[in-house]
Each structure stands twice: as C-alpha cells, then as structure tokens.
Image (spheres, grey):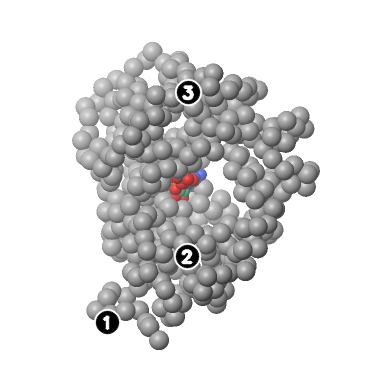
Amino acid sequence: VEGNEGASEPRFSEWACQRSTPLKHQNDFLATQLEILQKYAEMKDENHDYSRALAFRRASCVVKSFPITVTNVNQLNGINHVGPHSKRVIGELLDGYCDEINRIVNEEWFEKMKMFTGVFGVGPSTAKKWIERGWTSIKDAQESTDISKDWRVQWGLAFHDDLMNPVKSNEAYRFTEIIQTEAEKILPGIVVQLTGGFRRGKHQGHDIDILFTHPNGEETGFLPKLLTRLEKLNMVLCGSHESSSFHEKVLSEDFKLTARGQLDHFEKWLGICKLPKDLVSGDDAQIPLSNGLEKCTEIKENVDSLDDYEPKAKKQRKCHGDNSPFTIATSERDWIARRVDFIMSPYSQYYYALVGWTGSKQFNRDLRLYSQKVLNRKLTSHGFYDFTTGKTLPANSETEVFENLNLQYQHPKNRNC
Ligand code: ATP
Ligand code: MN
Ligand code: MN
C-alpha cells in the first residue's frame, strides 16, 4: 500500500488553511468531479444543512493541495476529510467510470438548477419554484410577467447574457484603476484594494470585489459619494447600499448565534455597473498580486474631501434599484453589465476584512473553524476575539492576521481551496 510518500515530507495537515492550495494543481479532474457532487448536494439540500455538500468540498480541497497526482485511491489512506463516499467515487473515477456522477450530469433538473441559480439574486429555492412552474430556459423567466419583484432578479434577468459571461482579470484591474482614480478625488488617502478571486490570481470570476479603507478613519459617507460620481460617469446600472450594522457584540457573539453565517456587517454596495467595452477588450494583462500592505503604509496627507458631490444623507440608499429594468441589445451599447461589490472597512478591522474578502469561501470556512476548534477564539472579517481575555487582537498587516492565528502565512494565490 502506498502511503503519504517520503518520511521527510511535512505532515499533510487536516486544516486547509495550513496547506497551500494553488489555482493550478495536479488533481484537477478529481477536484472538478467532487465539486459536481458538492454542488448537487447543495441544491438537493432541503433543510439547509450543508454537511453533505461540505464533505465533498473538503475532499476536493484535499486533492487540490495534495503533493502528488492521485493515481490510486489508496494514496489517500489515512488522510482526513476523504470519507468512504468520496473515496469510492475517486476509486471509480480512477478506474474510468463513476455511475453516480454520470447520472447527475445527465439529469435535466441539475442542468436547470445550475442555469437558474446563475441569475443574480436567484438561489436554490427560487430556482426550484421556477422549475415547478415548468420553466426550462432563462427566456421563460425573462418573458414571464408574474415574477419576483426583487430588483436583483429583475436586473439579473435583463442583463443575464452579459453577466453569465465571466469577468476577465484585465477588466477587473482596469475597473479598479478607474475606481482608484475617482476614489482618490473624493477622499485622498483612501485605500482601494481589488479582492475576491482576482486577488487569488484567478483569471476570471463572476464579479469584481473592491475593498476600501481609510487610515485616518474618514470613511463615513464615502461610498454614497463614490456612487454619485459613478452615476455621473454613467457607470451605474443598479445596486443597493447597505449601512454598516457593526457593533462590538458582533465580535464576541456565541458561535452558534451567528445565523448570518459568512455574512459580515460592513457598509457595502452590491450592484451592477456598466463597464466601457474598450475596457473589456485587450490582453489578459498581468499585474503582480498585491498583498494589500503597500498602500496602507503610504499614508497620504490629510486633505479636505472635494465637495462637488451631492450629499446623500439617507442611510439606506438605492441606486436605480427601484426603477424598472430595461433591455438594450449588446450590439447597441458601448458598455457591458458587470456585477460589482464595494465594501468599506474601518481601518482597525481592515486586515481581517482583507483576509475575509480575499477568500476563498472555503479557505475562510476552514480558518474560522480552525480558530474555533483549536484556539477557542472567534475569527470574522471584523476581528479576532479571545473569549478568555474578552479582547480582540489587532492586526496591522495580513501577515499579522496569520501570526495571531498561530498559522504559517499563506499567500493569496495559495488560498484557492
Ligand atoms: P468569483 O471569482 O466567482 O467572484 P470569489 O472568490 O471572488 O469568486 P465572491 O462571492 O465574490 O467569490 O466573494 C469573495 C469573498 O468574499 C469570498 O471569499 C467570500 O467568503 C467573501 N464574501 C462574499 N460575500 C460576503 C458577505 N456578504 N459577507 C462576508 N463575506 C463575503
Ligand atoms: Mn468575486
Ligand atoms: Mn463578490
């Protein structure tokens, strides 16, 4: 029986946050197949207990970070998170045929679920309702007059063709540059950081995630001003602004009380922007992966904000979200619709927010579980809370977040689990 090769090899950690999980690895086929089972289990899940789905995800994460190409299932003997079910599947896949996966990928229901949940604002429960109505295509949903009034679904359907087309990294970088330029005019010294999958080195993604902070703590009112400016530049299609719901209790709340799951309490704007088409074309420019440190150390002089932006006093503010969506053929416009997330973090929470918004989602799950189980501390995007001292540990860099957790630093490009 082949084991975990080489006695001098470092032990293969049961924690994904202690392993390096690069984008490109040696077990792509197995990982992809296991994630089909994950997705299917997620969609079948009626009582929102994602344990089955997560078991497949953890097995997929193991093969993604496994030091060798898996050619025999016995190579995974004694490795945590590869349970009997995943093991059987891997064995069958390596033998060339897995009936369970074969049946799933040929199931019409699964195809429709993937298609409908691909619409902005549509989750598994809405997708199931659409299938029950007998809808078989996006067009069926688009043509229906009797549909959810949720602004996201309406706009998501209206611009589905654009939105299903993945955002490329060069678009994300160029868009971030535009935001950086405009943001700096509104609030000098603002830190603008592209996060999400692009910070992990992905070449495409479903949206553009941008995290903001200000070293002098002057972030209040910035996001509404930025949106007003982007509206003037005709770059906003729709979106909704959410005020911060952070309070100190968030840090120390019992683990079990956090029904919000991975959701955080930052002020944010989630919406759809119009990106000029010339931004979209061109080569897949490579910019070096930033660790987010460089901009924060270079604290700019405090200059008064520009005041030529309409002040928007209202705390909750929707941009266009209340209007009815419209459609214009792609060929008749010089822009493309793109999902954008803007998040504002207070400077004191910034590096925790950076880790949280860089992801991957699974990396965060693992980090937080590790923190709870091994350290009995609570990690969120807002901070790291110690139950025994009743204090949060500050972090002045992303490296310090890992140091506080007693973990080896993982570069964003190795957080792709
Ligand atoms: P993609 O390339 O498909 O966009 P992604 O990794 O960027 O993938 P997102 O859904 O954009 O995924 O989220 C980016 C990161 O931010 C994820 O790791 C996720 O954990 C975190 N995140 C997303 N939404 C929230 C939220 N509402 N509250 C807290 N964290 C969030
Ligand atoms: Mn993203
Ligand atoms: Mn996002």
State the residue at coordinates (26%, 22%): 303
Quarter occupied by the C terminus: bottom left
Q: Where is residue 118 shown, x and y percent of the image?
A: 59, 43
**SS state under label 2:** helix
State the residue at coordinates (41%, 38%): 168
Looking at the image, is mark 2 or mark 1 nearer the viewer? 2
Residue at mark 1: 7
Amino acid type of the residue tagged 3 in the rendering: Trp
State the residue at coordinates (24%, 79%): 8
Ligand 1 within 8 A of label 3's CB? no
Q: Earlier in the sequence, mark 2 or mark 1?
A: 1
Establish if 400 lies above or below 303: below
Q: Earlier in the sequence, mark 2 or mark 3?
A: 2
* Residue 335 numbered tag: 3
Amino acid type of the residue tagged 2 in the rendering: Leu
Distance from Cα at disc 2 to Cα at disc 3: 38 Å
**SS state under label 1:** loop
Looking at the image, is mark 1 or mark 3 nearer the viewer? 3
Residue at mark 2: 30
Image quadrant of residue 76? bottom left
